[in-house]
Amino acid sequence: MKTQRDEFIEKLFLAAKSDSDIIFISVDMGAPALDQWREQLPNQFIVAGISEQNAINLAAGLSRAGKKPYVYMMACWVARCFEQIRYSCAMAQNPITILGAGVGLGYAPAGPAHEPTEDLAYMRAIENIEIHSPSSLGLIQSLVNLTISVPKIRYIRLERTVSDQVSNYKSNCTFSEVVNTGSQIFKEFSLLKEKTKVSILSSGYLLQRAYDASIILQKEFKIDVQIIDVIRIKPLNIEFIINNMRDSNIVVTIEEQALSAAFGAAIVEGLSDRIFQAKVLRLGLKTAYVFENGTRDQLLDNNGLAVLKIVHKVNEFVRAQER
Amino acid sequence: MKSGVSLIEKAKYVRKEIIRFKTNTGSGHLASSLSVVDLLVSLYYDEETFFNHKTDKIIFGKAHGGPAVYPILADLGYFSLSELDNYCKPEGILRLHPDQTIPGCEFVGGSLGNAIGYAAGLAWADRKKILVNVLGDAELYEGAVWESLLFISHNKLSNLLIVVDRNGLGILGETEKLLKLDPLKEKFSSFGFEVLSANGHDFNSLRQVFLNVPTKPTVVILNTIKSKGVSFMEGKAEYHTIIPKDKDLIKKMLEDLN
C-alpha cells in the first residue's frame, strides 16, 4: 500500500506544477514520489543536506518572501530544529509546513533515536501551530489543499503504515469535512449502540488497537465503546468530542507517546477548559525510549499497549467508576 | 553623504544616542551595539556604498547589537526620535533585540545562528533582493551558521552579503583564548566564499568593501573593537552586559566621543 508520505508528495506535486510558489525542501530524504518532482520541478526543489536547523530557517525566509515551503524530514528530527520552528517560524510569524515521516515507533526496529515518542508534547507547546495526524490516505488530498490555501505553521505527522482496516475507513463525512472538523467517529468499527459507555480517543496507527480492544470490551465485558479518531491534535476540536460523548463521561486516550504533556494531556486540558467533568484514563508507552528489537507491533505489545492490556485497563477503570 | 568628516559626525551622533538610551534604562548590550555603529553608518549614510535602505535589508544575527540601528532609523524617519527615550520602556516600541514589529527592522532578534539561514531563504526566493547579514564572531560557534554557509556558497547566493563583526570577544573573554575561531579567513575561503576584510571603524576601509554588490558569495570580516568609542570599556569582555550607571561615568563616556 502507498504510504501517506508518497500520497502527500504526489498530490502536492500536482499542485506545484501550476503553483510555482510551492517549494519542497528535503534534508537529504528521498521518496519514490519525489523523483518526478526533482526531474520536472528542479526550481521548486531545495536540497538542504542533513541540516534540519538550516532547512527550517531557509523555509522561514522563503515564507517571508511569499513562498509556500514544505520541509520534509523524519518526524524524530523536529526536536533537533525545535528552536528554529519556534523562533524563526512561530515567533517571527512565518508559516511553513513540516512533513514528519514515521511517527511513534514507526521506524522500529531502528531504535529510540528514530522513534519520536515525545513529539506531541513539545510540538503542541508551540503557539499557533497546527498538528495533524491523518489516519487514512483519503484524508491526504484535503490536508494538501489546506496547507496550500491557508498559510499556517503545520506539523503533519505521517504514518509509514496504517492497517488497511483503518486506512480504508470511510466516514459519513467527506474527507474535507473530516479535515475541517479535525475528528471523526469510527461508526462502522464501534458497533455503536444508543448508549455508549466509553469513548476511546486515538489516532493513526493505534486506531487499529483501539478497534480490536473495543470489540473485546463489547463482546466479552459488555462495555459499549465508541472510537473517535482525533486527526487534528492541535487545535483540538473539543466541542466535537464533547458533543459526541452523549450520556457518558468516561474517556480513554490511547497514544504511541510517553504520557507526559502529550495527547491524553491535551484531551484533559480541553475537557477541563470547557469545565466538562470526565473520568479520563490515559494509556501510552511505558517508556519513551524503547531499547528492544522487534516489529512496531511487538514493541507496542511489550510497552503497555497490547490489545489485551488495553482491554484490561479500560475494564478495570470502568468498574472502578461503577463502584 | 560622501565626506568622511560628516560620516564621523554621524557615527558620533549614533553612539551618543545609543549611550543615552541604553544608560537611561540600563537594559541591553551597550558594548556589542557600539562595535557595529560604523558599519551601519557606512551602509546607511555613505552614498558610495551599495546599500539602499529603502529596498535592501539588514538581517541581524547578533541582534543584541541591533539597537545600534535605532538612532539611524529614527533619523531616517522610520519612527519618531522620541521613541529612543522610550527604549525598553512599557510605552515604547523599541526593544532590547530588534524584531519585525519595529519599523525598518526584520525578523526577530535574540537567538543566535538563525538569521543567516532565514536571510538565505529570502535571498534564494528573490535573487534581486539585496541582503546583509550581520553575524557576531562569537555567533560563529553556532553550528547552524555553518549549515547555512554551505547552502549559501553552493547556491551562489551573492545577493546575501555576510558581515562578521570580529570584535574578538565572547562573554567570557577573548575568542582565541576561549575556543579558537581562527583562521577565519581560511575557513570561509574553504567554504567557497570570497573573503574581504576591513577596519570596521574606518569609513574609507568600509567603503572599499561595500562599494558594489558582490558578484560571488562573499564574507566581509570587520575588525572591530567592542565598546568602540568609550575608552575605558573598549575591548573589555566584562562590559558585555554591564552598562555604567554612575552619572559622572556616563558624562565621561559622552565626553570621550568628542
Image (cartoon, coloured by chain):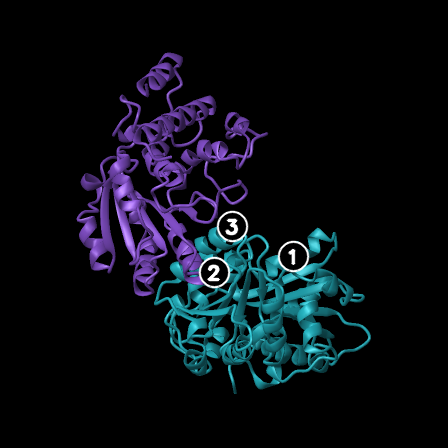
Chain colours: A cyan, B purple
Q: Which amino acid does label 1 sit on?
A: Val
Residue B162 spot, x, y in % from top left: 32, 50
| Quadrant, the C terminus of chain A | bottom right
Cα–Cα span, label 2 and label 3: 13 Å
Indicate the chain on which mark 1 is placed.
A
In the displayed structure, does residue B212 sit left or right of residue A261?
left
| Mark 3 crowd level (few <14, some 14–19, many ≥20, 10 Å Cα) | some
Res. A21 visible in picture: yes
- Residue A307 versus residue A257: which sits nearer the camera? A257
Write down the residue under mark 3. A92
Indicate the chain on which mark 2 is placed.
A
Q: Which sits earlier in the primary sequence, circle 1 or circle 2?
A: 2
Task: Say the numbered circle drawn on residue A62.
Answer: 2
Cα–Cα span, label 1 and label 2: 37 Å
Labels 1 and 3 touching (C-beta < 8 A): no
* Residues behind callouts 1 and 3 on a single chain: yes
Cα–Cα span, label 1 and label 3: 30 Å
Write down the residue under mark 1. A268
Residue A284 spot, x, y in % from top left: 54, 66
What SS does tag 2 mark? helix
Residue that protrudes farthest toward the right in the picture: A194
* Up/down of A266 relative to B257, above or below: below
The picture quadrant where one finds residue A279 is bottom right
Q: Which residue appears at 36% of the width and 47% of the height?
A: B50
Q: What residue type is labelled 2?
A: Leu
Q: Which sits earlier in the primary sequence, circle 2 or circle 3?
A: 2
Res. A57 visible in picture: no
Residue A175 spot, x, y in % from top left: 68, 77
